[in-house]
Amino acid sequence: MADAPNPLLQPWATPYELPPFATLQPEHFAPALHEAMRQHRSELDAIAAQSAPATFENTLARLDASGRLLARLESAFHNLCASETSAALQQVQREMAVPLAAHSSAVYMHAGLFARVDALHERRARLDLTPEQLRLLEQTHRDFVRAGARLTPAAQLRYAELMERLATLTTQFGQNVLADENAFRLSLASEADLVGLPDFVRASAQQAATDRGLSGCVITLSRSLLVPFLTFSERRDLREQAWRAWTRRGEHAGASDNRAIVREILQLRGEQAALHGFASYADYALDNTMARDQAAVQRLLDNVWQRALPALERERAQLQALMREAGGSDDIEPWDWRYWAEKVRQRTYALDDAEIKPYFPLERMVTAAFDCAERLFGVRFAERADLPVYHPDVKAYEMRDRDGRVAGIFLHDNFARPSKRSGAWMSSLRQQTRNGGEVIPIVLNNNNFAKAAPGEPTLLSFDDVRTLFHEFGHGLHGLLSSVGYERLSGTNVLRDFVELPSQLFEHWMSEPAVLRRHARHVGSGEPIPDALIERLNVARRFGQGFETVRYTASALTDMAVHALPRDRVPDDVVAFEAAVLRERGLPPGVGVNHRFTHFQHLFAGSGYAAGYYVYLWAEVLDADAYDAFVEAGDPFDAGVAGRLQRHIYAAGDSVEPGATYAAFRGRAAQIEPMLKKRGLLQPG
Ligand SMILES: [Zn+2]
């Protein structure tokens, strides 16, 4: 069949030009990607080779519209690798990592292309551009500069080497963490080992054993298994064992030791920043954010840290009281905290999963998310069972706008399976643009909910519902995008702005009016009682001291280590991290969200390096933004929702984020609503 045409390189004759999932095979990707890269290069060469002087249309607009085939192939490829992978796809992934990275470098170091972009940028004030066109020019120019376009040829060579070495190191870092997580197995052999674990934890532990060809139950270092184990297991000795293994991932001699890798990554990042003329990697990374500089990030972290410490001690007192009541006299250790916090939660708020989950069947919660989007933004979702998808569990929907036009396609992939990576995320197969003709977005949401037995409804926890709404908020950011150019479309915003639409959308899932309408008992159809809504919402505020201290501690170590100049990177990164936490006064018995040797946000890629703070930054925005609805007295106030759609969900990166936020809110964001939401405004 050597002559059979590659379906990826034929026109995609599917509805909405979805990828031809039914016919494509892993071996189609490498040749198609190579061909798409070749086409992209020749598109770029043609832009650069024009004899006419650079104009916005002949350079910027064409550049923005170039590489569409490559973008679509890469999107299809990366989505399959994440959600429906196989050994064959993983092989292609390893094979293609370097060529794809090299292609990206070559684009931004294309001297002829950059000369034209740079010439336009020089004259930008005199080009008579629309605000969005000016933003496109500025952001595109910045992309080139930040990827090394301005460096001397010798420095560019070194820069490309750095990028290649960093790609290798960050890949290795992630694989080492995964190896440690898979290597550890805490076998729970008897009922005595399982004591305290609710059915859903036992079921996951059993599934983990089955996945590994074992019988009985095992706890691995997968977060979704480990955290419930630490929360419910009555066996303090086993909790300690699991906790120690979890926090030592990447930190021990042997093949998966990440300590030297972290050090080398930090050195290379220091060199990368220095090539750009920055004193530290933090300065380089923050130059392209809303925060802009270290001082702004530090102010936020310091403010929250000093309020979180007393909140934590208030929680500790509650935990300790209960612990003493139960006859314990020890200090609370990090492997005890979640366990006793759960006991306090159960006693104070009388919350029990068995009582809660029947009110949250998955299907109803999906309807709830769609309904909120409809009431806010006038969009309607309708299932299209005939659209091609990559797995039978994936549901496809058309999203119609107020005028009844199909404005986006949404694929919802909710269930865990062995071929899918863990976690929850939004991605897309195609981004909205009007450059070169109207293109509607194709957006995906992936979750990892445990699927119920055949014929049974899948029931979610309150946390699961929040995850569903969070990812759908990202999804709406992609689906409602209404901009002229792809580079500025949807979620292509600054990284400390990207969590605003997602975290903001979570607010609607805890609105009593939404819960009363949609959270109905799977058996009786009765709406969730008001008293239970109240308990759920109050209980969510308990534990914020613990969560905030652990998160902020990790954000502080991230900033501290990336603020070092390249010649001050410590030999012993573990000791450096401990010293920062000591200096900051991390209280005993709490721990941190991530330690350097397994901090994937920082070292399994560069997306969140000197950027772990972004969730908190965006939370300042989302809490302040939701207050606009509270002030209006209606969670679906049409005026506020209209501004929210125009300035936040539809605007992409077409307007500078601070300005677009102020256009929505009528002023800059204030920090108090976030502090209040986390319960950090009470006197210590
Ligand atoms: Zn998110």
Image (tube, rainbow, N blue to C red):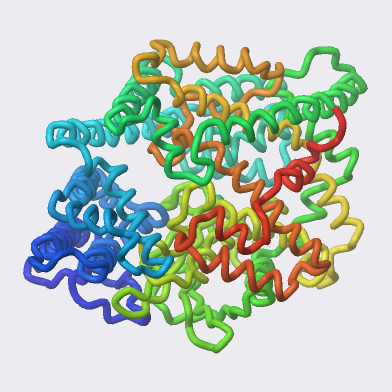
Q: How many marks?
A: 0
Q: Position of residue 32 (x, y in %)?
A: 18, 62
389 left or right, relative to 274: right
> In the figure, 591 relative to 118: above or below?
above
**Residue 456 showing in the rendered view:** no
Tell me the quarter of the image containing the N terminus: bottom left
> In the figure, 474 relative to 199: above or below?
below
Q: Quadrant of residue 179?
A: top left
Q: Nearer the viewer, residue 249 or 646?
A: 646
Q: Nearer the viewer, residue 276 or 336?
A: 276
Q: Quadrant of residue 259?
A: top left
Which residue is at a point 33% across and 22% down the rendered structure image? 267
> In the figure, 340 relative to 447: above or below?
above
Q: Position of residue 93 (x, y in %)?
A: 27, 48
Q: Nearer the viewer, residue 564 or 194?
A: 564
Q: Position of residue 97 (x, y in %)?
A: 24, 45
